[in-house]
Image (cartoon, rainbow, N blue to C red):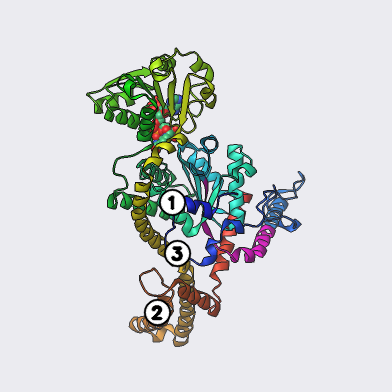
Amino acid sequence: MAVVSGSVASLLGPKAAPSLRRKSSNAPFSALPGFRVVPRPPVCVGNPRGRVRGSPRCEATVDLVEARTASRASSASALEQFKISADRYMKERSSIAVIGLSVHTAPVEMREKLAVPEAQWPRAIEELCSLNHVEEAAVLSTCNRMEIYVVVLSWHRGIREVTEWMAKTSGIPVSELRQHLFMLRDSDATGHLFEVSAGLDSLVLGEGQILAQVKQVVRVGQGSRGLGKNIDRMFKDAITAGKRVRSETNISSGAVSVSSAAVELALMKLPKSYLPSARMLVIGAGKMGKLVIKHLVAKGFQRIMVVNRSVEKVDAIREEMKDVEIIFRPFTDMLPSAAEADVVFTSTASETPLFLKEHVEGLPPVSDAIGAVRLFIDISVPRNVASCVSDLEYARVYNVDDLKSVVEANKEDRLRKAMEARAIITQELKRFEAWRDSLETVPTIKKLRSYADRIKASELEKCLQKIGDDALTKKMRRAIEELSSGIVNKLLHGPLQHLRCDGSDSRTLDETLENMHALNRMFSLDTEKAIMEQKIKAKVEKTRS
Ligand SMILES: NC(=O)c1ccc[n+]([C@@H]2O[C@H](COP(=O)([O-])OP(=O)(O)OC[C@H]3O[C@@H](n4cnc5c(N)ncnc54)[C@H](OP(=O)(O)O)[C@@H]3O)[C@@H](O)[C@H]2O)c1
């Protein structure tokens, strides 16, 4: 896997302040030993007892009771096996990871194969969560990126499973994917999402669509089990960071977007003298199509042809831009419309190309004044214009990746704005990390409380029995109960105080975690193991159902 923290960090610039999380959680991906993906069954490698899927007992003669017993025994042995390996899991704990590729690491040819349309996000999340080491998942699939955010029980295994899933769904071999994938862990993963949401990682710095797309991930994910407490909170905090960056810095001034860059690119490619008479066609009247139209209008174009499957969206655009001549053409007229255009912008969500080589070959030539070359500016992912169209002498095709040349122009200004935004991201990241850190001690707090409550209840019971019901008035009984609660609460107050670390006091996370481990040891709470076993058990049961 070529791109790890290092290369992404170089793309993103200096990362946010060091996180509160323990150092081991940010081990670089290069620490993944021999990431050679060999198909093998989960967990049971080299250990026949560890078979997880499929009981060997499958003879038709096994009666129902026996079958149930066998299944329970097999479940138990699978669970035992998982428990044996729990110690290994315990050395690392659940991590947040992002695995993906973006416009900075992979060409559009690859991104389009991995793209997951919004309608399929729930299915993708379901599949990801059913992987053995994945607890929570979200998919951020846009024209610039395909990123999978997961909470993994084991970093190495989780990453491997997600990468294999990506290879399976895209048809791209893991060996090829590895050249382009990046992966980040814990605070680096969170920081990355915050930067993405703020538009810092976008092709066009500060563009607004990405924030809407991050919001959409939360909207679509609501109610799905993939958006568990960590991912849900991380995405919501990313939205807060994205909003703050836009409102507190001038990063989005100039209203830049992929669509405006697309229009800029077209204008750069057309001879200035020809601009006023250039014939513009926009295919697709969704969010992007509408923005292309808006930018064309802002550049002075007063007559624009629009092809869309349905007329409603075009009518709505017409309603908004009454002074402009917007000519609607149905989809069946796409080729005749292209025949009348010098520049064709494509921005539909079609999953297959709309323009093939043979279609473009059949179009009449455009004016010599623009070099007899028809421009196709395709901002769709997957692309709407087949790549072989660019083989034609009289057609020039540009896709989203070609917009880089437009946005490079104001690089210095972009970097300065990005610096301002990073300060906000650092603040938001600290808040999220403090929240996440505070979660770690919650199980110990709960266990310690219930341990103390159990002792209190049993000692109370003994005491009340000794005194005898007859000798006790209601008032006396309440006084004894209050006495026992008072003692427990007072004794617990100190230890519980030392388990709370939400970033608002001077105690460090390390100190709090030391306290947590000490209390776990002293009271034999063993919360980490219990939680891990609980999670593993749930996975085993799910696998078997
Ligand atoms: N949103 C972004 O920030 C962004 C940025 C850069 C690039 N893009 C890319 O731009 C494209 C459009 O995105 P969008 O955000 O504008 O989507 P959108 O608002 O959902 O609009 C989708 C458009 O595509 C049309 N369409 C959908 N399926 C089609 C099909 N099978 N054949 C022909 N037309 C079809 C729709 O026509 P109807 O109105 O008839 O349904 C609509 O005009 C996508 O490929 C996306 O990856 C999006």
Residue placed most toward the observer, 445 or 155: 155
Q: What is the count of numbered marks?
A: 3
In the image, the residue with mark 1 has its CB under 8 Å from the nearest atom of ligand 1? no
Cβ(mark 2) to ligand 1 < 8 Å?
no
Residue identifier under label 1 = 193
Quick one: SS at disc 2?
helix
Image marks 1 and 2: residues in contact by CB distance under 8 Å: no
Amino acid carrying mark 3 in the image: Ser
Task: Residue 89: say if magenta.
Answer: yes
Residue 350 x, y percent position in the rendering: 47, 28
Q: Earlier in the sequence, mark 1 or mark 2?
A: 1
Query: Which residue is drawn at the image coordinates 29% and 48% (left, top)?
Result: 250
How far apart in space, not on screen, are marks 3 and 2 (Cα)?
Answer: 28 Å
Give the quadrant of residue 157: bottom right
> Residue 493: which numbered mark, if any?
2
Residue 500 showing in the rendered view: yes
Q: Amino acid at mark 2?
A: His
Q: Which numbered disc, 3 or 1, marks the residue that appears first in the sequence?
A: 3
Up-down relation of residue 164 to residue 441 (above or below)? above
Q: For the point 45% across and 68% down, which residue is it?
A: 442
Is the residue 478 above or below the residue 317 in the image?
below
The three-letter code of the residue at mark 1 reads Leu
469 is within the stretch colored magenta: no
Name the spot of residue 436 as percent of width and height, x first. Answer: 44, 62
Instruction: Tell me how far mark 1 sits from mark 2, CA to CA.
Output: 38 Å
Task: Judge the density around disc 2: few (<14), some (14-19), many (≥20) Cα neighbours within 10 Å.
Answer: few
Mark 3–mark 1 Cα distance, whole angstroms, equals 15 Å
- Please tell me whether the stretch drawn in magenta is mainly helix, strand or loop: helix
Residue that carries the numbered disc 3 in the rendered image: 19
Tell me where the magenta segment starts and ends, as one range. Answer: 76-100
Q: Secondary structure at mark 3?
A: loop
Instruction: Give the foreground label among 3 and 2.
Output: 3
